[in-house]
Image: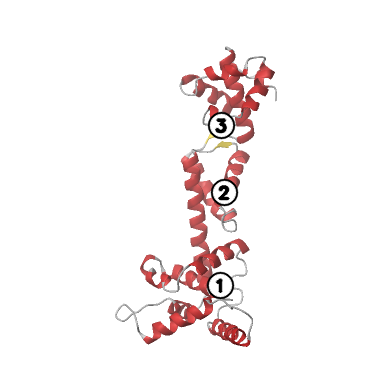
Amino acid sequence: MKIDRCSPVGGGATALGFAVLLKHYSRYGRFPRGRSEIPDEVVAFVARQLGVAAGDLGFYEWAGSTIEYHHAQIRDHLGYRVATLADQEKLTGWLSEAVTHAERRPDRVREELLAEFRRLGIEPPTAGRVQRMVRSALRTAEQNWASRIASRLNTSAAGRLLRLIAVDEDDDHDSVNEESASLLALIKGSPGNVSLESMMTEIDKLQAVRALDLPADLFSDVAAQVLDGWRARAMVEAPSQPRRRRHRHPPHRNRQLARSFVRSGC
């Protein structure tokens, strides 16, 4: 890249500041947030190309009309434009469908989002806004999975799962609830050391899971990372927690939590 081709006429600080902005934008598809984001070796390299002192960058103004003018010139030169609200909404939807349905690590999701911004020639919004887009996409994908899997359950299977986390508000010690809690604890229980007793317990657990009569292909198209996340969430929750939170989740969300518990014991 010939940095001096589109550099503005001006002193060393102006030319070096413009060139550094251009170099950073060409690589990352966005402008640096300040001098601290630019490595000294990059500044030194660009300064040598321009024949100016690297220290001149200390005189460049990082706010005001000059840098805004430079931003506009660089966007025009590279064919980029600033992301609109419509762009952000569209890419959040794309993210939930194409990325977060399988990738649940926020850092990796953010990388995919920024790469898509660059591919489209769109300058991403602020770091805070990007983070909110990532969180929204992760949440939407989770809700979509919950609804999709819940739709695969017939009424009887859904009822059996909900009974695992049901609670009678009039009598928390109802025998049915105690039985459900015991079954849930059995499914979640660790197998322990290998012995005849532990083998019989695992057989009881398998029979209890089979008695729920869930569809064999219930999780067939769910990515391994998503299943691992559900399993980890299930294992750190006490059996009573989903029941206590039932007012905070719609029915399909409760069923997903129950399925997570069941799967963690399989």
Element at label 1:
helix
How far apart marks 3 and 1 lie (CA) works out to 44 Å
From the top left corner, tell me how far across and down residue 29 is, in percent: 59, 35
How far apart marks 2 and 1 lie (CA) works out to 26 Å
Figure quadrant of the N terminus:
top right
Residue 53 position (above or below residue 168): above
Residue shown at the point (45%, 74%) measured from the top left = 239
Element at label 3:
helix
Mark 3 burial class by Cα count in 10 Å: few <14, some 14-19, many 20+? few
Element at label 2:
helix
Residue 166 position (above or below residue 68): below
From the top left corner, tell me how far across and down residue 67 is, in percent: 51, 22
Residue 112 position (above or below residue 67): below
Query: Which circle marks residue 107 in the picture?
Result: 2
Figure quadrant of the C terminus:
bottom right
Q: Is residue 53 visible?
A: yes
Residue type, numbered disc 1: Ser
Reading the image, the residue beneath label 1 is: 264
Q: Earlier in the sequence, mark 3 or mark 1?
A: 3
Residue type, numbered disc 3: Glu
For residue 254, side relative to residue 51 (left or right): left
Q: Is residue 77 visible?
A: no
Residue type, numbered disc 2: Asp
Residue shown at the point (51%, 73%) measured from the top left = 261
Mark 3 vs 2: CB contact within 8 A: no
Residue shown at the point (46%, 82%) measured from the top left = 182
How far apart marks 3 and 2 lie (CA) works out to 19 Å
- Please, which residue is most extreme toward the left here? 170
Reading the image, the residue beneath label 3 is: 37
Residue depth check, mark 3 versus mark 2: number of the one nearer the observer: 3
The colour scheme of the drawn protein is secondary structure
From the top left corner, tell me how far across and down residue 88 is, in percent: 50, 44
